[in-house]
């Protein structure tokens, strides 16, 4: 329980309208897109950096746990208040503070929705490359906390590759700024890289400077079908191995395609054992050459059909289908266990087979979806968590999937983060010394452990 005096002081900072404390209100902030829950004692909605600083000063003095939250789209439980305390929701800090295309940067607050930033940049002929599947609702602060990726990250990289600087409030309430507005800056430690992906365990981001890029001249999207999932995965490895770098190279298996089509009804090839959604961009001539090279590799690996989207509407429909996969699978059962293991691109065929075999072993339905070009695979298993026997099989399956990824020189996460979901698996891919070193850093900036406690560090 939080000291009543501390609660009154916190309420004074944000006012009555931006403080939730009733059971009904708190229940809405006890979960995210993961399947665990923990009830906070208080939810606060700051509007300024100074309010965030004041809140953290009080919480630090009273050793009150604080968990940052954006749109609640985390699928690893990163924004669940595992130890109760205060949820600091940044949805009202949603201003785009500056757009500077001459110097190729924007400055935004953490509550800015990713898709809204894209829309704001489009009239200037620029875009922000990281495009997580939840971009229509997920916020930049959450993207920074999880080091979010998305389909475009094969060519363009993930969130950390676009952070030039940020403003952060530490556990003590102290405000620190690092980085700059410059595209090139190697002055001192790159602290933005440390905070990006830290899941709110080191500090609260109150603004971030992001690099932006000019929109490409031409974009082409291909939908490719295969009658064999192995061939689908081998085509990915061959394309990447030949030095071809599309914007996106997305793999979906038959289960995923059928599930999406049953809901979306947009004409996806439900008889295909595997599909690839491939996108290239750049100058028109360069795109045409790249498509020709990709087509040769697809044909050599037994592609059954290759279709190119003829209009922007067709292209948007294909991507809408791809981005809807998680939501569609979530409707199949009361719970959905999904992960984002990563393996070297050359190991995609082997890892895909292992996932299917493991699911079959435990008599589970699995959908295999992947940002396949960079080895980032998302196995999705719908199940019922209240059925202890079934959920036990799901847990055993993912234990084996994680171990399999590690055995192929892979890792636990490419974009979803660790949170509550994967902390137990850290020893599979990190040494004891590396894990301990993360603890040293955590202790240095958050000595009382009040920031997002109960998570991976």
Image (tube, rainbow, N blue to C red):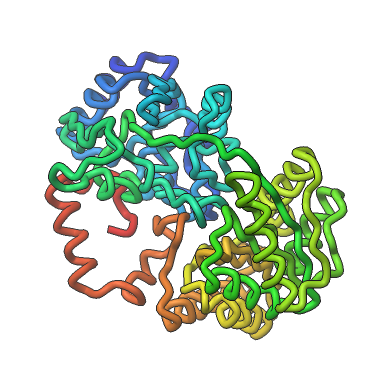
Whether residue 309 sits left or right of residue 292 in the image: it is right
Q: Pinpoint residue 372: horizontal percent, then vertical percent.
A: 58, 65
When asked about the image quadrant of residue 215, the answer is top right
Foreground of the two, 255 or 12: 255
Q: Pinpoint residue 310: horizontal percent, then vertical percent.
A: 81, 45
Foreground of the two, 329 or 242: 242
Query: Which residue sits at x=57%, y=22%?
Result: 123
Query: Which residue sits at x=34%, y=74%?
Result: 429
Query: Which residue sits at x=45%, y=81%?
Result: 408
Q: Is residue 19 visible?
A: no
Q: Is residue 15 above or below residue 250?
A: above
Foreground of the two, 175 or 423: 175
Q: Is residue 10 above or below residue 169?
A: above
Whether residue 181 sits left or right of residue 231 in the image: it is left
When asked about the image quadrant of residue 272, the answer is bottom right
Q: Is residue 282 above or below residue 342?
A: above
Q: Is residue 425 visible?
A: yes
Q: Quadrant of the N terminus?
A: top left
């Amino acid at each position: 329980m939080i000291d009543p005096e501390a609660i009154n002081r916190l309420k004074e900072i944000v006012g009555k309208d931006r403080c939730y404390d009733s059971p009904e209100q708190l229940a809405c902030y006890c979960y995210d897109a993961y399947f665990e829950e923990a009830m906070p004692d208080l939810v606060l909605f700051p509007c300024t950096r100074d309010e965030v600083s004041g809140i953290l000063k009080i919480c630090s003095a009273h050793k009150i746990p604080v968990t940052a939250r954006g749109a609640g789209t985390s699928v690893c439980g990163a924004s669940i208040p595992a130890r109760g305390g205060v949820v600091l929701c940044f949805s009202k800090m949603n201003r785009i503070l500056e757009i500077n295309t001459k110097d190729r940067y924007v400055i935004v607050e953490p509550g800015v929705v990713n898709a809204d930033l894209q829309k704001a940049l489009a009239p200037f002929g620029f875009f922000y490359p990281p495009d997580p599947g939840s971009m229509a609702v997920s916020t930049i602060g959450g993207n920074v906390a999880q080091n979010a990726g998305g389909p475009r990250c094969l060519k363009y990289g993930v969130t950390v590759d676009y952070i030039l600087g940020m403003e952060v409030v530490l556990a003590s309430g102290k405000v620190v700024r690092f980085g700059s507005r410059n595209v090139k800056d190697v002055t001192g430690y790159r602290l933005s890289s440390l905070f990006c992906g830290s899941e709110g365990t080191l500090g609260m981001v109150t603004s971030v400077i992001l690099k932006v890029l000019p929109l490409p001249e031409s974009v082409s999207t291909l939908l490719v079908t295969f009658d064999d999932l192995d061939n689908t995965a081998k085509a990915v490895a061959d394309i990447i191995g030949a030095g071809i770098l599309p914007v996106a190279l997305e793999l979906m298996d038959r289960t995923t395609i059928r599930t999406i089509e049953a809901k979306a009804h947009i004409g996806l090839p439900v008889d295909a054992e595997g599909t690839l959604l491939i996108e290239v961009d750049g100058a028109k001539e360069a795109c045409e050459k790249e498509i020709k090279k990709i087509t040769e590799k697809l044909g050599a690996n037994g592609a059954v059909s290759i279709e190119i989207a003829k209009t922007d509407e067709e292209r948007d429909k294909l991507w809408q289908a791809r981005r809807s996969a998680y939501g569609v699978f979530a409707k199949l059962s009361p719970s959905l266990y999904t992960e984002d293991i990563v393996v070297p691109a050359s190991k995609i065929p082997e890892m895909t087979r292992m996932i299917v075999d493991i699911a079959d072993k435990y008599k589970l339905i699995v959908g295999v979806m992947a940002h396949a070009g960079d080895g980032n695979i998302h196995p999705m298993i719908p199940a019922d968590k209240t059925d202890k026997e079934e959920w036990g099989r799901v847990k055993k399956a993912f234990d084996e999937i994680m171990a399999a990824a590690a055995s192929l020189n892979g890792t636990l996460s490419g974009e979803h983060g660790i949170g509550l979901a994967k902390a137990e698996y850290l020893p599979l891919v990190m040494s004891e010394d590396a894990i301990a070193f993360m603890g040293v850093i955590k202790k240095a900036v958050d000595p009382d452990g009040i920031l997002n406690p109960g998570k991976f560090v």
